[in-house]
Image (spheres, grey):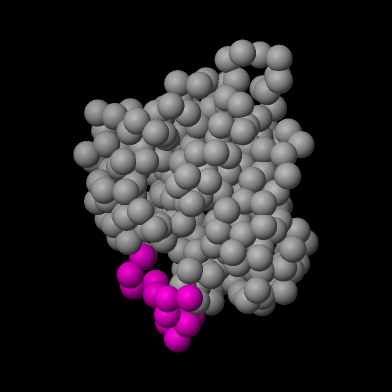
Amino acid sequence: MKMSGSGRGVESRRSSLDLEIGEAPSFVPTPTPKKAVPNGVSSASRPTDAKMKIIIVGDSNTGKTCLLRRFVEGRFDPDGTFATVSVDVSSAELDLGSQSVGLSLYDTAGQERFASLCTPYYRGAHGVVLAYDVSRPKTFARLQSFWRGEVVEKVGESVPTLIVGCKADLLDDSAPASVPANEAEALAEAWGASHFEVSSKTGDRVRDAFYLLACTIMNQRLESDPQNIISDSAAISMEGGGGKPRGGCSC
């Protein structure tokens, strides 16, 4: 499934599964956010119909932790984040219509020297977020020169993948330092991935991005094994060990 969400007037592309943001996925009706929970997301606290393990990778200071904090906690706190060493784990629930999906979100270290420490945490991942900073082209180039290779080697090429441009609130179309949206979309197309530009500061498109990734994972499961969709918690529950789930993460 491929989808773009740059927020810069780029048209969304209809995927082979015929899913667009704001459109109901084929397997469930349009989700109804829970009134008491920001963005329809909550800390995992009740039985879920399906569980997913998602790895977030990318260079340091791309905004990975702020992205997760906005998604899981509905808040933005750039001063309360620190460089991740190894992995931090968060858990949340996301409603996909009648399905309640439990997400285990693994925020990995962005420094290459810590990459080997993160290897065990890739095991059993159902989806991957490749994060870059839209104002720093080097972080985008690193997706191609390093991070994509890590994902393919440790998880496989067919894992549902989301390319996320963080800090979209810093975008200035006239600034030569920003990563052009069409370049990111072309890369996503080549990798069979989806692309979004998001702002953790404003919350713009953060939930849309994770919702689409969850839908992609769910649809892949339905295609490969429709009888085993309800729960495989034993296969993904903190596999890789070490990290403790909590409501937020440190960067």
Q: Is residue 133 left or right of residue 204?
A: left
Q: Quadrant of the C terminus?
A: top left
- Residue 147: percent from left, percent from top: 36, 37
| Residue 40 drawn above or below residue 68 | below
Q: Main secondary structure of the magenta part?
A: helix
Name the image quarter holding residue 77.
Answer: top right
Q: Nearer the viewer, residue 172 or 78?
A: 172
Q: Nearer the viewer, residue 64 or 19?
A: 19
Q: Is residue 85 left or right of residue 167?
A: left
Tell how many labels. 0
Task: Write down the region rendered in magenta.
Answer: 223-236
**Looking at the image, which residue sits at the far bottom?**
227
- Residue 233: percent from left, percent from top: 39, 72
| Residue 44 drawn above or below residue 121 | below
Q: Residue at 47% across / 45% down in the picture?
A: 190
Q: Residue at 65% across / 74% down in the picture?
A: 26
Is residue 52 found inside the magenta-colored segment of the image? no
Q: Nearer the viewer, residue 240 or 178?
A: 178
Name the image quarter holding residue 216.
Answer: bottom right
Q: Quadrant of the N terminus?
A: bottom right
**Looking at the image, which residue sits at the far left?**
116
- Residue 212: percent from left, percent from top: 61, 57
- Residue 198: percent from left, percent from top: 64, 38
| Residue 235 drawn above or below residue 166 | below
* Whether residue 178 can be seen here: yes
Q: Residue at 62% across / 51% down in the picture?
A: 3
* Whether residue 81 can be seen here: no
Is residue 225 found inside the magenta-colored segment of the image? yes
Q: Nearer the viewer, residue 93 or 10?
A: 10
Q: Residue at 50% across / 76% down in the picture?
A: 222
